[in-house]
Amino acid sequence: MPGKLFEIHISDFIIIMRLSSVLRQFLLLFLSLQALGSSSAATDSTKPTMVTPFDPCYSYTILDQSWRSIYNTTVNPYLICDYNFNFVGWYRFLLDGQNAQMTEQCIPIFHCGTYVSLHLNGGHPTIADGVVTRNTCLFWNNDCCSSQIIPIRVKACLGGYYVYELVKPSPYCSAYCAEVTSSTNMAEPGIFYSYGPMVENTTNAPSDDGSSSSVQFPTPFLFFGNKHQQIYVNNNGFLTFNQSSSQYDPDSFPAFKNQDIIAGLWTDLDNREKGLVYYRQYINGSILQRATQDINSYFSNLTFNASWVFTATWNKVAYYNLTSTETSFQVVLISGGNYSFILMNYAGIAATEHPVEAGYDTVNSYYYFVIPGSNNGSSITKLNTSSNVNVPGRWAFRVDGESKPIAENTIGLELKFNSYSDMTNTANVEFILQKVRQNLIKKGLPSNIQLKLKKILKINP
């Protein structure tokens, strides 16, 4: 039988941690919103939202009807006509889960599940072109682009896909046709930075437990006080700085070893049978503009300009001895001035019985972070929906802090909550402290947070 309800007032609640001023501000905001009581889940409903310019690359509707394929010649039981659809806004094509684009071929009648097929005339734009206007044409009376021409707007997006501002075609029974090409057969959502043959990435050789050669940075990458001039992309889903690694069984963070590691999804991957591992470094262009915008939106108290960006992408790579699986993720290093950041982007992640780990670890594990759920092979399928920056599938970290212990920063906080538990019991107090600490770490704060309780004041008997 539960005891009497006590309303406990915890005063002078002391949190000791090694934090930058940015994270201290984040902590204060978080705790002002946190409701600690019957539920330990964080409440995000009152979190301030960022106002950013509209970009159709991140605001679109997916059209994934398989009948839109140029290879579909089945029209039974009825023809499908796009003049029956109410098109509003921008759209992206997928076919059987793969990235697709509007076809540029002249497609005969009775294809794409319709009577007259619509294709794009004038070619697709490049990323540098921005939003362009193109005509969509009907193949009719042996004329590849007949008099029925319908203009639409198109944009190429970072990540190797296109979005289209479609309009309702008329008066014929027609439909927009799509196809999968070598340049669009990527698995990533819009959060991925550009990679693949469209942007001339370097590809790791097919090799079980292989790695790239060393990639030299234009300026050192600051990683918790250590300055790194090079990096290695290891096929098994992680990055190392001092030397390449063939280790397929991941360390459990904190590993307390003598190396810095960034693990996108460290596990036993095998790119010999399926999938590609890409990497590229950018020192100018639109990628730097995008990185600058992303970082300033996630860390709004900074004025940041990216000077270089490095991307490593695992696209549809299989697990070892499981060639039917496909896993896609990306690690992005962003550097500028005395600041450095990591983005981890996730698309389709297959479950596995192999050991897994995603996050980062430092020399002697002074700093480390494990993305929640990433060290369990059955729960990693949810990585494409989790986030610490309110962008599903993306985790963002500032990583230029000191790697050695610095003077402790102490924040005094006062919490008030209701509890049936006897809060004079040391075990109950420790339980509450652990709940607070777990929620802070889930929100992206360092895992070396220490909590100490100075005083408990009981308000009601």
Image (tube, rainbow, N blue to C red):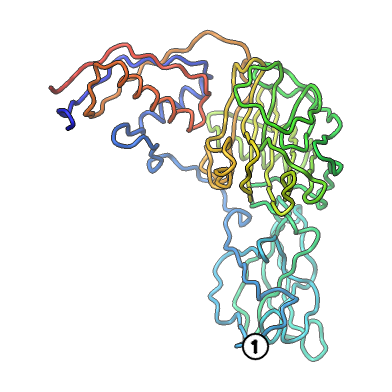
Q: Quadrant of residue 342?
A: top right
On screen, residue 218 above or below 448: below
Residue ranking furthest to the left: 461
Q: Residue at x 74, y 79 (%)?
A: 137
Q: Position of residue 204 (x, y in %)?
A: 84, 41
Q: Residue at x 62, y 34 (%)?
A: 358
On screen, residue 417 above or below 205: above
Residue that carries the numbered disc 1 in the rendered image:
172
On screen, residue 154 above or below 262: below
Q: Position of residue 310 (x, y in %)?
A: 75, 35
Query: Viewed as shown, does residue 435 lie left or right of 7?
Result: right
Q: Residue at x 41, y 40 (%)?
A: 44
Q: Secondary structure at mark 1?
A: loop
Q: Residues within 10 Å of mark 1 (few under 14, many from 20)?
A: some
Q: Position of residue 338 (x, y in %)?
A: 67, 21
Q: Nearer the viewer, residue 155 or 183?
A: 183
Check the picture and name the quadrant holding the N terminus. top left
Query: Viewed as shown, does residue 348 lie left or right of 128?
Result: left
Q: Amino acid at mark 1?
A: Tyr
Residue ranking furthest to the top: 407
Q: How many marks?
A: 1
On screen, residue 230 above or below 330: above
Check the picture and name the quadrant holding the C terminus. top left
